[in-house]
Each structure stands twice: as C-alpha cells, then as structure tokens.
Image: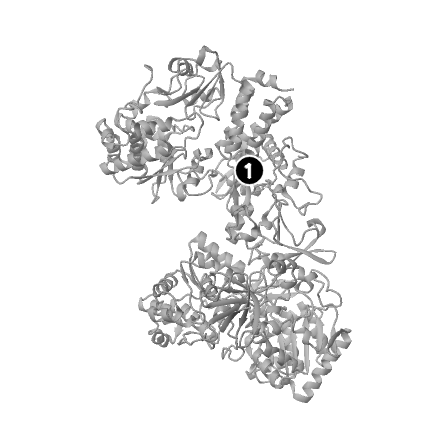
C-alpha cells in the first residue's frame, strides 16, 4: 500500500474498491471502510463481478465482466479528462507521459467500455466523478485485479487513475493493494524473489551484487532466478532437480495441480519444511517440522509496510524446531556457517543490507510497529509514500489498451470460473482446516452459481455437481446465490479434496509478474 | 359549568375543526399573522413574558425553551407531542376534536419564532381517527393558505407509553426503538435527525394563538401567577361527572371534584385523588384545597402532569390500585436503563406480594429503597416517576399497607 | 478550560470533557458497565452515577458534559446506595455460575459486587430464562447472564458494521436478539467475536476456549496474526505451555491496526497450533513411505542431496519456494541460504497466489 490502513477509516473521502472482497478477505480493513461510509459520509465505489457485502452500501456498484478492468478504468479516465476533472497541476508538476494515456483512453468512452464490461455507461460516469472530485480518494484492490494474464496492466491502470487525479502522497489517497498473506510483504522485502536481494535491490546490478558479496562473504550469481511457474515447468522438463518448499503448499495453491504434481514427482530431491504434513509434504523426500507463529520470535510486515513483532508464546511442539534454526543447521551442513543466537540478531543483520529497514530495531517496535522506509533510528517511518516525489522522480503514466483474458468461455465451456477465498478459511487450508471451529462451520467447498444459470442447468441449491474445465474436474455442492452474476461461477481454493486449482490453467501467466489467471477460466457444470 | 373558563375550547362544537375557514371566521390565524410580522426575538420574548409553561408535564417556560434553539442552524423542526399515553388523560384529543386549527396555528407560530418551516405531529397509535381529522385540518389550512410555507406531517406511534417522553418520541419518528436519549444534548440543540427541534405538547401549542391575539399580559393575568393561563382537565374514576373541563390554573382541586365533578359517585366519601396520570402522587383528602397549578401541586409532592384527575372513593383498595399501576410501568418500561428495566419489574413483584398478603415489613423497606434509587438514578422521567404512586401511598395510606403485610 | 471540584479536589479540564473523564483525571475510579470509549454512548447502566451539588438527581458521568463550577462527589452515600441497588438488581437477573463461568476473575459484575460488598440481592425472585443453545462453533450466548449493557449491539453495528443483533422486546423482557430471534448463523453475523471482546460478563464467550483456562490461569503474549496481510495484533493466552485462546488488545499503541477488533479467523482460528496433526519430528522417505528420522539424519540427507545435485547439475538446478507466512528473519535466511550457500537466485514465494 502506498498509504496506511487507518486512513481508510478516517481520511479518505472516497474509496474505490476494485477486485477486493474486503469484508471477507481483509475483514478489519473492510470494517473500517464501512465505518467511514456509514459514519463520515465517505463515498464508496465498488467494482467487482461478485455482489460483495460492501456493494450494498456503495454509491456506485459496477458489476463488471471478469477481466475487463482496463476497459473499465480507462473509461473512467476518459470521463475525467473529457469533463475536465483531472488534476492539471499535479499532472504538470509530478508526472510524465500523460499525453500518451490521454490519447489511448480517447476511444474508451463510457458507452464503448460499457459494451465490453457489461455495465451501465452512466454508472461509469458516476464512479469517475465521485473518485475524481473527492477531496481524498483511495483506490484499494486485491487479487481480483492482479490474478489475470493482464495483471500488471491492470495495476498500472489503477496507478494511471490515481496519477490523473492527484490522489497520491497525502492521507486518505493512494494506490493500495491489500495483500493476502500475513508476511507476503515481508517475504518480498526480504528478497524471497528471483530478481532481487532484500529491499528490491536487483541481483543483476553489479554494484549491488558486490555489496552483498561483501556482506555475505561469497561470490553470488549474476543471473535472475526463476519464478515459481518457471520452476514448476523446468522441474517437469527435468532441468530443476532439487526443490526446497518452505511453508508453502503448491499442491493446493498453484495452477493446474495435475501439472504441479507431475513436476514434483519428477524431482530428485524435494525438501519440505512445514508445520503439517501438507499435500506437498506428502511428496517430499525429507520433511523438516517447523513451528507456528506461536512458537517463535521474529517480525511480520503487513500490507501497509508496518513491521511488527511476532512473539514466542509456547515452546515448540515435540521435536519441531523454529524455522530459522532449521535453515541455519542446513546452511552449516552445506559449508556456509550461519550462527545466530536469536531472530533479533538476524534482524540486526537485515538492517545492514536493507536500507528501508535500517532504522528499525526490536526496541523501537516493541509496542507499535513502524512503516518502512525507515532509513535511520531517528526516522519515524513512512506511512504515506510519494509525498514530495516518486522513487523515480516523476510519476510515469502507462498507456494501456484493454486485452481479453486468455481463456474465454465458448460453446463447450460456457461459464467464467473465478476462484478465491472465504472468510472462514485461509489459503490452502493447512491451518484453518485444522482449526476446529472454522472447519466445523465450513467443512467443504462449494461452487457459487447464479439462480438464472442454475435454473438453466436444472441445478438446485446444495446439489452436488461436477465443475469441469479443460484441466480436469471437481465435485462440489452448488450454492445458488445472487452473489455471482449469470454466466459466472466462483469456487474456493482452500479444499484439497475439491481443489479449485485442478481446474485453473498454467499455460499463460501475466508476462511480467508471472501471476496465474485465477479469476478467469472457461468452465462448465455437469449434473451428477 | 359556570366556573369553567374556556379559552382553548371556547368554540367547542360550534365550529368544524377540519375546516380552516370556520376557524378564521371566529378570529383564527390572526395570531399567526401577527407573529409573522414580528422579529423572531421579539416573538420569543412575547411568548416568554406570557409565562406560558409546557402543558405536557414538565412545566418548562415555552418561550425560554425556544430561545435555546441555535439561530444559525439551517434546518430546524417543530414537533407536537400528541402521544397522550397517560391512562385517564384525553385532553389533547379533545383539543384536536374541538379546535385542531389552533394547534396548527400554534405550531406555525413556533415555526415563525425559531425559523422552521417543518412541523411533525406525533399522534398516539390509539387515535387513528385523530390522524384523519388532523390530516383534513392541515389540508384545509394549506388550501386556504393560512399556514403559509409552514408544513405539517402527522406521524403515528405504536402504543408505547415511553414515547410520550420527548427524546423517545424523536427516536420513534426517526424509525428507531422508542427509547429515551440521555440529555444533554437537549432536543432544542440536537433533536430530530440531529437538528434543533422544539417539542411541545398539543395544549401548549394551542395556547399560542390567543396569546398572540390578546397579548402576553392578558395571558399572564389568568390563573396562577407562576403558571398562568387555563388548563384542560379530564375527570375520571368515582365522580358524578366524568368529563373534561377547562379552568384557570388557580382553581383548587376540591372545586374540580365537588363543583365541576358534582362530588363523589353514590355520595360516598373520597379516599384519594391521583392527579397527572398514572405516575402521579396519590393525594389524600387533607390536601384537596391545593390549587392545580404546577408549583402548588409540587409543594404537596404531587404533579399537575397531563391534567388527569382520577377520583377514588372510600371503598377503593389503594394497595390493589398501586399494584395494578406497578404492572403498567413494568409493561411500559422500554428496558434501556437498569434502574427502570429491573426496578419496575421488581416493584411489580413486590407490590403483588404485598397485595396478596404474603409480604412483610422488610418488603416495604425494600420497595422504598428501590423507589428512592429509581427516582434519583433512572435515565428518563418514566423510571424516575414510576415509583411515585408507591412512595406517596406508603406515606399517606400506611394503614392500608399495614393491613396487608404479615 | 473549565474548573470543577471532584471529591474536594479542584481540577481543570477542556470544555466538552465528560464528567467521567474529569473524574478519572481527578483520580476517582468510576465503575462503568455500558461505557466503552470506542462506542456510541448509551448512558444506560447508571453505574457511573455521581452526585453534582444542586442537582435533584444523580447524573450518569459518562454522558454528562462537565460544566464550570460543578461540585461532584463520586462516592457519596446516595451514589453508593444507588450503585449497590443497581448491582443487586443485576444480580437478581444474572445466572450466578461463577464456579464454572469462563469469566470468573475477569467479570465486571463480580468486580463491582466485590468492591461494594454486594453479596446477594434482596430483589432475587423470578429469573429470566432467555437462553437457547445457538448451534455455532464460535460464540456461546448465555443471555441468562446478560446485564443488558448493549455493548455487543453497538460494537456489532459500529465497529464491525454487521448489524447482526439488536435489542428485542422491551422492559424486563428486553433481550439481545438477531432478527426474528434466530440463530447467529442465519443472521448477518460474521463471527468476528467483537461482541465477546466487549461483553463485561460471561454472557458471550468463546466456545473454542471453553474450559481451557480463565484469565488468572493464563499468561498473555502480544503478537501479530498469522492469517491475512492486515497485520492485526492480539494476545495469545497461554496455560501450561499450551495456547488456549486469543484475546483483544484495545490499546491503539499495542494494536495500531485493529485496535482490538479481529475477524473470525484471528479470534477463533488458533487451535491448529495445538492440533494432533502437527509435525513433531523430521521425516525421510523410504520405499515410498515417510518415516520418522532424527534431525541429524534428516539434515544430513538433505544437505548431501543438495551437494550432489549442485556438483552434478550446477546450483541453478536447485530452487527455493520461500514462505509468505514465515517471518522476515526466516525469509531473509532462506534466500541467503540459496543465494550464498548454494549459489542460485532461484528463490521465490507465493506472492502471486
């Protein structure tokens, strides 16, 4: 997030939610937005193919066709420019490449986009005006925007919209991805990415590499590494021989599980470090028992870049070891000694190579976490990015044309399938399926079907059906609900016994981010 | 009937209250015309100096109440309390039935004073025929142009006694549970939908046209000095003449019962009289020479309240009556605050125990203690007043209690 | 600034300060049941009544603005008498099950009865019988213990925004209810348990923590939630080295993101920690089956295999999927392990999933 969570409760005077079912997937953030709308009169625009809870209190609800985000937002920009609602001073002083965007969005009139997106042109105008005329407008999005073959385009389009209206750099504004996992922000910050060391420092930059070679005392590879989809594919081809999976469960979370399974079976070595014998761990050659967040010390960085403490409450179960100790043990055996007495000592090392974390230490975040960047110990942290200038200087507009999703419905697979999360479960269900109350409340997967679609297929609520795509099929109960529009079905990916990712495709990813297109697969439903 | 003094009810049954024209012919809407020409501050001052005090029960100076409304607020409302939930009270209904136009005129005068063009009448759910009457009366007045740009809507309650309390009434108009709000803020500052609101009783509004027409000094000269004007009373119970009367406020209780009321039914002796509705104190024969005005009644531990006068003859069982009253309050408590919700429930339990002859002195001590706490700690007037019949009867009719305890 | 006298002590407070806050500033401990600084005021429990000189009735301190020149007594005989009677009235409707109650030791009704020496109620007679079992796995609703502070109603409406519950009926029959008095699961309830957080007594408790330990038997450890990326903080409740529950921290310093509010997963989804399924020993695959192994055996096995692949196929034949659920420190070490110890940038994690 460019901005902080609490601004959504107090400072934002308009919030544009797109591709985020906030009250289910980031409940606390959802509650804050609802509070702002109900009690402070903040305006709310919701764009989502599903009729999510917050759509009920939205000033404008755009129920658009999955995967048409760029067309929708380009049309909003068309309205803003046409009606002169753009932030001319901000554009002149703080951005570049505006003209190209203005040129591209010309053809995206509300009527043109309405055709593509399946919404009312007038609603696009209304949404554009609300966001553009708001004193402080915030855009929030989640995987609904990113999990597309055009995910990067979608995100850049959101940035364009914010740049166009000057909604950046002050409280209550910003472009705010709501991240789905407790420390996904931190994992990125720490360099768990194939192209960067901690703090997004490129592995291909010789100066930076030299810095890390000095810090770590060994020569380092100058080449970008492989992303997860590439690793899976290369394992399938036999180029990747050994894989260590640490606290992940690709056998449930990754697209086209059948393909993933074949890839993992093809490995010479699969190491899995986890707290449970996950679907992935069952395939491992060796399994290391790690511990839960309750059994170790450390830090998490949340979606608003706030670094907070995790504290050990109990001793590790059985012979499980804190994960940092396991990694040290393995490293020592590989001839690269790692000797740390505590996570705090590791953190002290992180500070020395991670400029954005340099000013943070365990004492400073003992009570309240600090937002990075925090370059020194006197620095209060940075809840709001891009206040005076952008990292690159001027904010860069990207002219982006709408592209259709990769796999569109056809005669054989006439429905659009989207996948996502439920309020009651988390990710691959490793933890929540073993939380007694959560699993009792929601013990199995469902597929959400619009009543019209269900009637056409002669399917009734709670009927067990077969959900089929070109990759495979799962059997799930139908949940007949107005939440999804006709022609769109939705299922959850938490349930390994009816795994949504048997259905998703791993052929085409977003070319830049390598994100799978979980929100659009062509599907059909068969009666059983 | 000679001793009545009819101001509000002067033309009762002589004009059709639904027809504004008839009201105009007897001098109606002159006061409003006058008020409209006055500076609002002068108008408020005029009402204030008339000494008109709220006829709903609290007896607050009406002009003073209006003066608390902030001048700069954009939207303000005038609300008329026609909830009239006190058992034995029907004077507001009578005023509407006999002289509805005076109520409308009074509300519009208030509107002129506080710069509001929207009024609401909150009518009790048991009066659907009054709602009809008022809607016709408003239509007629609007058609005649008598109200100018002042609009009045009628809203109907659902039979909750507590909605006679002004903030609960406001909650009910807003569509919420009929529960009182804590004060401050008072409605004059933040009332209906959060904006400044004057809430007055039907009778208070109906007094205004004559005050404007005849002048504040005229009104101030009627009845008791500190609570001037007339008061409409409704006489019920063991009386020979159960009807309504309009009297000057220095009229004494004895004359209400014996002159206007023609004495106690069947020639029996009087045991007690309860004034002001169910929450009123029970007044023994020895206090009958008290004038009915607010302060004089207060001095004997009673309250004029709504103006209901309930006569009980010598054969009546005081404990039994109070026991029934306690059941009424248990039923009507909204349940918001602890002293009232729990207190009215336990009062009813103990009163029934006493009434059935199973109680001891300890129970009387307990109910007195509870009454004291309810009076000083309950959130609104309902909870504070509910124990008054209990306390006043234990004080004045101790022997009747003594006879029932073991 | 205005000046007022509280228990004989003169204090100055800004205009607009409530009497309750002024009393607290003056060092007076005012009991409250319905008051919550994060919620709309109710002014209904009347426990906070104080005596202001010259006023006929007691005033509820939480809803009364302080006025210049006020002279306030917070424990006068009238005040104490009222509080005692209110407590007795509440005791008379509260099912006394302290011996088995989850909130024994952290119950405001219990605390105030202790403080004012209220041992039993002279008004004890008919008890309410509201309770019906609500068949959800998260929240136990025992309205026979409810004292009608309505904090649950307000928190549900104002913090969570679910508006799942409200007061139904009136007078002594008033009770907390979902629409049409149904099950929580059939209402708009999202089982966030904010109602459990604010309940001052044992009317609303966690079913997941039931019977596992009371507040005085547990230690609390402040930490950060392990689920989504919002970064809510809360306390893990620990008894005998087991996690037995999660409780809110409502201090905005210690809980800057959520100020105590949680979702169903954060509040009720912690017992996986104690699951029987937990991995408690290293495993090695042998003849297609995973079998327990010692740490040395497992680590050596892994290290030798890595060395072998690296020697044969080069470091880029190895890859790491790191973890969006592990700590910063662990992610740092994991990528360092692959970059520095093994020599490849094949490091990724499921940021995209």
Q: Chain of mark 1?
A: C
> In the depicted view, which residue is nearer to us: B11 or B190?
B11
Quick check: C260 above or below B310? Answer: below
Q: What x and y, as percent, mark residue A341?
A: 71, 69
Q: What x and y, as percent, mark residue B321?
A: 52, 22
For image coordinates 50% across by 14% down, the residue present is B314
Q: Label 1 neighbourhood size at 10 Å, few (<14), some (14-19), many (20+)?
A: many
In the rendered structure, the answer to whether residue C34 lies left or right of residue A88 reads: right
Quarter of the image where the C terminus of chain A is located: bottom right
> In the depicted view, which residue is nearer to us: B350 or B201?
B350
Give the residue at mark 1: C173
Quick check: B308 above or below A262? Answer: above
In the picture as drawn, the residue positioned furthest to the bottom comes out as C312
Which color scheme does this rendered protein use?
one colour
> In the depicted view, which residue is nearer to us: A20 or A266?
A266
In the rendered structure, the answer to whether residue A514 lies left or right of residue B96 reads: right
In the rendered structure, the answer to whether residue B388 lies left or right of residue B228 reads: right
Q: Dividing the picture into quarters, in which one does residue C289 lie?
A: bottom right
Q: What x and y, as percent, mark residue B376?
A: 54, 30
In the rendered structure, the answer to whether residue B171 lies left or right of residue A107 reads: right
Quick one: SS at disc 1? helix
Can I make out residue A284 in this image? yes
For image coordinates 51% across by 47% down, the residue present is C179
Can I make out residue C56 in this image? no
Quick check: A499 above or below B61? Answer: below
Q: Dividing the picture into quarters, in which one does residue C315 lie?
A: bottom right
Q: Dividing the picture into quarters, in which one does residue A369 lie?
A: bottom right
Q: What x and y, as percent, mark residue A233?
A: 58, 82
């Amino acid at each position: 997030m460019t901005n902080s969570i609490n601004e959504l409760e107090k400072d934002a005077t308009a919030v544009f939610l797109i591709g985020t079912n906030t009250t289910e997937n980031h409940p606390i953030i959802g509650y804050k937005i609802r509070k702002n709308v109900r009690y402070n009169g903040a305006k709310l625009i919701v764009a989502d193919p599903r009729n999510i809870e917050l759509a009920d209190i939205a000033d404008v609800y755009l129920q658009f066709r999955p995967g048409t985000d760029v067309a929708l937002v380009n049309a909003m920009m068309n309205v803003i420019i046409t009606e002169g609602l753009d932030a001319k001073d901000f554009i002149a002083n703080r951005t570049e490449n505006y003209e190209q965007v203005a040129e591209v969005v010309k053809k995206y009139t509300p009527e043109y986009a309405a055709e593509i997106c399946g919404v009312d042109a007038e609603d696009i105008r209304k949404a554009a005006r609300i966001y553009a005329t708001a004193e402080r407008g915030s855009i929030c999005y989640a995987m609904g925007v990113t999990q597309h073959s055009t995910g990067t385009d979608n995100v850049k389009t959101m940035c364009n919209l914010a740049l166009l209206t000057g909604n950046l750099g002050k409280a209550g504004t910003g472009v705010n991805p709501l991240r789905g996992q407790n420390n996904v922000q931190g994992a990125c910050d720490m360099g768990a990415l194939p192209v960067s060391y901690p703090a997004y420092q490129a592995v291909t930059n010789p100066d930076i590499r030299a810095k890390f070679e000095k810090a770590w005392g060994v020569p380092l590879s100058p080449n970008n590494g492989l992303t997860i989809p590439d690793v899976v594919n290369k394992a399938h081809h036999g180029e990747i021989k050994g894989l260590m999976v640490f606290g992940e469960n690709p056998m449930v979370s990754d697209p086209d599980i059948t393909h993933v399974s074949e890839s993992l079976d093809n490995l010479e070595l699969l190491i899995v470090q986890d707290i449970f014998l996950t679907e992935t761990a069952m395939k491992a050659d060796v399994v290391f028992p790690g511990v839960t967040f309750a059994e170790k010390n450390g830090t998490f960085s949340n979606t608003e870049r706030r670094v907070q403490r995790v504290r050990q409450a109990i001793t590790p179960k059985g012979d499980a070891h804190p994960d940092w100790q396991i990694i040290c043990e393995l490293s020592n055996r590989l001839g690269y000694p790692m000797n740390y007495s505590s996570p705090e000592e590791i953190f002290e090392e992180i500070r020395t190579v991670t400029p954005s974390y340099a000013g943070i230490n365990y004492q400073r975040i003992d009570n309240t976490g600090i937002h990075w960047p925090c370059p020194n110990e006197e620095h209060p942290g940075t809840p709001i990015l891009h206040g005076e200038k952008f990292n690159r200087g001027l904010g860069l507009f990207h002219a982006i044309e709408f592209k259709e999703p990769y796999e569109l419905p056809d005669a054989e697979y006439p429905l659009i399938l989207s996948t996502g999360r439920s309020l009651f479960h988390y990710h691959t269900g490793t933890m929540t399926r073993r939380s007694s109350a959560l699993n009792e409340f929601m013990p199995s997967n469902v597929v959400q079907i619009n009543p019209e679609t269900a009637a056409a297929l002669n399917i009734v609520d709670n009927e067990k059906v077969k959900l089929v795509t070109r990759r495979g099929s799962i059997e799930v109960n139908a949940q007949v609900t107005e939440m999804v529009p006709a022609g769109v079905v939705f299922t959850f990916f938490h349930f390994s016994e009816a795994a949504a990712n048997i259905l998703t495709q791993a052929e085409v990813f977003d070319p830049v981010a390598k994100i799978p297109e979980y929100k659009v697969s062509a599907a059909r439903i068969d009666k059983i | 009937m000679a001793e009545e003094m009819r101001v509000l009810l002067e033309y009762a049954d002589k004009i059709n209250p639904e027809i504004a024209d008839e009201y105009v012919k007897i001098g109606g809407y002159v006061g409003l015309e006058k008020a409209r020409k006055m500076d609002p501050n002068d108008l408020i001052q005029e009402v204030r100096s008339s000494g008109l005090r709220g006829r709903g029960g609290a007896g607050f100076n009406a002009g003073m109440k209006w003066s608390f409304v902030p001048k700069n607020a954009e939207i303000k409302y005038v609300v008329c309390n026609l909830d009239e939930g006190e058992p034995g009270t029907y004077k507001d209904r009578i005023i509407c039935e006999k002289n509805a136009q005076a109520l409308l005129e009074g509300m519009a005068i208030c509107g002129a004073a506080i710069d509001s063009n929207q009024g609401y009448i909150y009518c009790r759910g048991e009066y659907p025929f009054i709602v009809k009457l008022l809607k016709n009366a408003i239509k007629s007045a609007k058609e005649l142009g008598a109200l100018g740009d002042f609009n009045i809507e009628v809203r109907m309650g659902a039979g909750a006694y507590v909605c006679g309390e002004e903030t609960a009434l406001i909650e009910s108009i807003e569509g919420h549970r009929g529960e009182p709000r804590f004060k401050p803020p008072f409605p004059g500052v933040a009332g209906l939908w959060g904006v400044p609101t004057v809430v007055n009783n039907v009778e208070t509004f109906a007094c205004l046209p004559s005050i404007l027409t005849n002048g504040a000094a005229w009104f101030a000269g009627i009845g008791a000095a500190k609570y001037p004007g007339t008061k409409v009373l409704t006489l019920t119970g063991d009386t020979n003449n159960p009807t309504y009367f309009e009297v000057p406020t220095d009229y004494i209780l004895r004359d209400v019962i014996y002159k206007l009321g023609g004495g106690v039914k069947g020639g029996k002796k009087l045991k007690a009289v309860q004034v002001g509705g169910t929450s009123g104190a029970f007044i023994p024969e020895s206090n009958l020479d008290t004038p009915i005005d607010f302060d004089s009644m207060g001095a004997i531990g009673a309250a004029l309240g709504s103006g209901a006068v309930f006569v009980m003859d010598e054969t009546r069982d005081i404990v039994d009556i109070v026991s029934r009253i306690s059941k009424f309050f248990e039923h009507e408590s909204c349940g918001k605050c602890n002293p009232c919700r729990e207190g009215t429930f336990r009062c009813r339990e103990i009163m029934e125990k006493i009434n059935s002859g199973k109680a001891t002195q300890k129970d009387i001590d307990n109910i007195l203690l509870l009454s004291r706490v309810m009076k000083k700690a309950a959130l609104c007037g309902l909870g504070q007043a509910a124990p008054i019949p209990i306390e006043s009867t234990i004080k004045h009719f101790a022997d009747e209690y003594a006879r029932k305890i073991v | 600034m205005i000046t007022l006298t509280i228990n004989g002590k003169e204090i100055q407070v800004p205009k607009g300060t409530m009497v309750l806050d002024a009393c607290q500033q003056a060092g007076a401990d005012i009991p409250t049941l319905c008051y919550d600084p994060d919620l709309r005021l109710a002014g209904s429990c009347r426990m906070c009544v104080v005596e202001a000189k010259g006023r006929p009735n007691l005033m509820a301190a939480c809803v009364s603005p302080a006025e210049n020149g006020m002279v306030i007594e917070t424990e006068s005989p009238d005040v104490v008498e009222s509080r005692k009677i209110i407590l007795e009235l509440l005791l008379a409707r509260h099912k006394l099950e302290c011996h088995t109650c989850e909130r024994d030791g952290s119950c405001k009704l219990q605390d105030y009865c202790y403080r004012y020496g209220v041992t039993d109620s002279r008004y004890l007679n008919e008890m309410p019988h509201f309770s019906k079992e609500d068949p959800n796995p998260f929240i136990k609703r025992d309205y026979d213990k409810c004292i009608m502070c309505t904090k649950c109603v307000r928190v549900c409406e104002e913090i969570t925004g679910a508006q799942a519950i409200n007061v139904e009926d009136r007078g002594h029959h008033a009770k907390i209810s979902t629409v049409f008095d149904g099950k929580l699961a059939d209402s708009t309830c999202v089982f966030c348990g904010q109602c459990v957080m604010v309940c001052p007594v044992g009317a609303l408790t966690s079913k997941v923590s039931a019977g596992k330990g009371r507040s005085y038997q547990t230690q609390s450890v402040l930490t950060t939630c392990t689920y989504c990326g919002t970064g809510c903080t809360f306390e893990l409740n620990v008894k005998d080295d087991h996690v037995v529950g999660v409780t809110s921290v409502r201090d905005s310093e210690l809980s800057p993101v959520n100020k105590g509010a949680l979702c169903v997963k954060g509040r009720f989804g912690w017992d996986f920690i104690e699951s029987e399924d937990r991995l408690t020993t290293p495993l090695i695959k042998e003849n297609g089956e995973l079998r327990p192994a010692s740490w040395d055996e497992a680590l050596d096995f892994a290290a030798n295999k890595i060395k072998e692949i690296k020697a044969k196929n080069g470091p880029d034949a190895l890859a790491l999927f790191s973890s969006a659920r592990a700590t910063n420190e662990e992610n740092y070490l994991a990528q360092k392990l692959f970059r520095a110890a093994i020599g490849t940038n094949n490091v990724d994690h499921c940021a995209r999933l």
